[in-house]
Amino acid sequence: MRVKRAAHAKKKRKKVLKAAKGYRGANSRRYKLAKQMYIRSGQFAFAERKKKKRNMRKLWIVRINAAARMEGLKYNELIHGLKLAGVQINRKMLADLAVNDFDVFKKYVEIAKDALATREA
């Protein structure tokens, strides 16, 4: 007895076409094109998830640098000073403090300045 694939094939095509809904032109209506764009969109999505992490780190660094310069330190001096002082705080938290709680951020800057001063002396 032979295997009839109509139901499974239709289900597979329906899944791809549903995912391709909203694509421009024939990319959302023709199965072959829709399938190609569906695969390609997955590749773009994967790459963008990686880029998002890079972009967020860049944003945190920009924010930290801007706040540190207001206190008379450069970004790299602040990070170096915090490392010398043994303070373990990540850039995400530092950036959040710089934006939302500047007084606490100033204390971290003072810790970094003290650590840099004791190293130079």
Image (cartoon, helix red, strand yellow):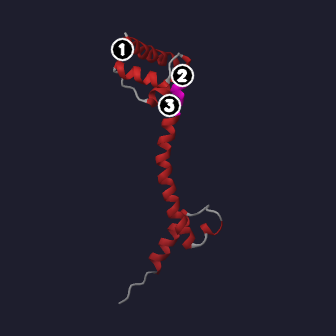
Q: Predominant secondary structure in magenta?
A: helix
Q: Position of residue 115 (x, y in %)?
A: 38, 15
Q: Secondary structure at mark 3?
A: helix
Question: Is 66 contained in the magenta span?
Answer: yes
> Image point 50% across, 44% down: which residue?
52
Magenta stretch?
59-68
Q: CA distance from mark 2 to mark 1?
A: 23 Å
Task: Say if mark 2 contacts mark 1, CB within 8 Å.
Answer: no
Name the residue beneath numbered marker 1: 119
Task: Say if mark 2 contacts mark 3, CB within 8 Å.
Answer: no
Q: Closer to the observer: label 3 or label 1? A: 1
Give the residue type at disc 2.
Answer: Ala
Looking at this rendering, what residue extends furthest in the right direction? 25
Mark number, residue 23 = none
Q: Position of residue 28 (x, y in %)?
A: 60, 67
User: How packed is label 1: few (under 14 Cα within 10 Å), some, or many (20 or more)?
Assistant: few
Question: Is 10 contained in the magenta span?
Answer: no
Name the residue beneath numbered marker 2: 67
